[in-house]
Image (cartoon, coloured by chain):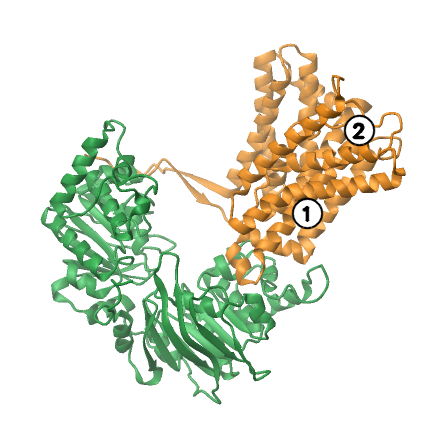
Amino acid sequence: MAKTAKEPLIRLSKKDGVSEVKAWAYRGVAVIFGFLFVTLFMYIVIGMEPVTLFETMFEGAFGNSIYLSSTIVYATKLLCISVALAPAFKMKFWNIGAEGQLLAGGLATAIVMIYLGSSLPNWLLITVMFVCSILAGAIVGVIPAFFKAKFNTNETLFTLMMNYIVINLVDFYCNKWRGKASSLGELNMATRAGYLPNIFDSEWALNLIIVLILTILMFLYLKKTKHGYEVAVVGESVNTAKYAGINVKKVIIRTMIISGAICGICGFITVSGQDHSISSLTTGGGYGFTAIIVAWLAKFNTIQMIFISLFIVFLEKGTELISNTNDAFDASASKIVIGIVLFFIISAEFFINYKVHFRKKHEA
Amino acid sequence: MKNITKSFGKNVIANKNVNLDINKGEILSILGENGSGKTTLMNMLSGIYCQDSGEIYVNGNLVSINSPKTAFELGIGMIHQHFKLVDVFSATENVALGLSKSEKFNKNSIKNKIIEICDKYGFEIDPDKKIYDMSVSEKQTVEIVKVLYRGADILILDEPTAVLTPQETKKLFKVLRKMREHGKSIIIITHKLHEVLALSDKVAVLRKGEYVGTVETKNTNEKELTEMMVGKKISLDIERAEPKNTTDRLVVKNINCINYEGVKLLDNISFTAKSGEILGIAGIAGSGQRELLESIAGLQKLNEGEILYNNPKTGEVDNLRDKTPIQIRELGVRLSFVPEDRLGMGLVGNMDIIDNMMLRSYRKGKSVFVNRKKPKGLAEKIIEDLEVVTPNAKTPVRRLSGGNVQKVLVGREIASAPSVLMAAYPVRGLDINSSYMIYNLLNKQKERGVAVIFVGEDLDVLVELCDRIMVINSGKITGIVDARNTTKEEIGLLMTKTDSLDTQGGEE
């Protein structure tokens, strides 16, 4: 049992307070490292030159008006969901159910479009759609919150399960509506009833404006209002919140109503303003989860979310073009690229928070 | 034959230059108040923490304990205060959990070995019983057996008797003595003096992370140990004005509080807090101080009793029991509460000083927006008046030192012009200067006619600062004394006065 004494090789200690500027510098360096790794990866796998790689990525994201509008549409959606998640995550309520809440809003919108499309004037129809989408999103969001507040259930599992319920509900309606057709297609194609108007000659401008307004409102809500203050206190420490006399249950329920409602609005603008149809892919194919990363990276600051969502969609659209033009590189490989870059950014968080000490070489 | 010497030099001063040694077949007690670093020290020995400096020797070899696994390999086993058992497993299965991979998982052979161990040391245990069916004492037995099964020669028990009835404690001690006969070394962490004297061979005393010394049990007595534990008298000079125009402000009548495990946290507590007076509460940490204050603040549900508040404004009497903190506020009752756990309860660590200022007052006004103007003014005033060392008012409280955090908290509570001010360990971890500033603040509040309730650990301060001192032990009042005519020793004895008078431990 003769063990020699050795300090551990690597020891971690927590850093205290890194300035915001420095933190972003860390992240910037991480992005650079991430891209270096990506270029290496791409060179080895498909033999793509680094310069071509970046050219293709920029081309795919911003190259022409079609690519550009696609990037904006997706970034808008990602931003909207991230904004919806911000208050819940700030409260440390792990809302994994954005997919379901968004689809619930979208489904409510589609139902109103189909069943009331011909009987209501357009402005009233859109208003009803809007209200119903908010209600639907909020209801799906508040159910796990209610159980969390009353019985302290695990919100991660609960919100996740709610996703499956709503996804299958959407599939059920899609199958019902499409009848014998192969897919649902555009709803109310002939009458365009319940379509959000195009402004500035584009389909996405109105959506973008709505989402930017929500982003600013949420920023103010979290930073400047009493509600936002309560959310922050509950997120930091439930004990402190109770000590301060905050009704924790009420705050949890209220915050999830808001979170779910904004997801519902996202469903509404997607169905009414963009797709004019619905399917379980209305969420952008997993944006409800991608938004969690956005919310975390932005530290629940919704203004920062604008840039982060744009960056992630840039990666996605850029690599999409690479996979479209390269046989050796399919769509799943583009996910690998995004994964690599995100992984580097997230590891930057580790170095922002911790300092690494190596064993000193003394009395060796 | 076996010597562990251990010295540390930690910046956070959880432990500072501690030296311990224990021989084979010996029981060593580690004595000290809560927060004196007993558990930290033992965690280093059992591989949960790693010491910053200093050396540990086992059997004369210098070792480095990086993980609980290494500790096991060295024959060190720890029995934690909070059991680490899997509820749905049986005793045997729990023991099997920590076995090394090379060992074959054979339930029957494990079971037989457990029975063997039990017979050897005199444990009584049913190896097939599920943990959730067990009493606290049985669970503890499983923990001990688990450690012995793995071949531990050095056992560390962290406050093992805190959860036991007197009868169970007796049984435990019998077993421990038997283990000593078999050559095991036992380290027991406790703050119950009579247990120390009854059980151990040697006593090591810690105070505020510092090693005071080790004494042979047979050469010492309760008084000497208390002195070592509490420290030599430091001459303090706290101005103490005579209470003026005292009236009964808060009358607590027969309150009882039982937690979900059926342990009585507060046992029939009755007292009166008067305006213009500082009522000290003394007792070993964890004797119910926290629960008492929290029940007055509306944070702790009571099983029986009432808390009557004589409202100086309306002249009415309100019962605070079972009211929420908000309701207590709305009644016009002004309780300012400096909780024990400053950053976990009184303040929000990641928020800046301004945001923390409004924690209890942000609701004021009808606007949906928070008004940060007043809190900002208050923050700046407190920083200036109380000499808070901080870059500015926008610094997260977490980054301030302990003393400054406390100033922020006490400053905020006093700013709400309370009529009852409760402070739990307000000077814990503070240097002398900051401590005095807090004492002065409390004294000023007393002169303003506030009823101050002060929970303290330093008996010297309690004796010099308070007007009356209430001593509690295990949730019961063991005496209320006049601070002007008492001694530290008297309070110390009241603090540890237990089982001889405690007849109800085993009943239920």
Where is A223 relative to A103, above or below?
Answer: below
Q: Residue at x 62, y 50 (%)?
A: A253
Labels 1, 2: one chain: yes
Amino acid carrying label 2: it is: His
Residue B75's image quarter?
top left
Residue A13's image quarter?
top left
Image colour for chain A is orange
Q: Residue furthest top?
A: A327
Q: Is residue B62 left or right of residue B316?
A: left
Q: Quadrant location of the C terminus of chain A? A: top left
Q: Is residue B56 left or right of residue A333?
A: left
Q: Position of residue B212 (x, y in %)?
A: 25, 62
Q: Secondary structure at mark 2?
A: loop
As measured in the structure, the alpha-carbon distance from the residue carrying label 1 to the one carrying label 2 is 25 Å
Q: Secondary structure at mark 1?
A: helix
Q: Residues within 10 Å of mark 2 (few under 14, many from 20)?
A: many
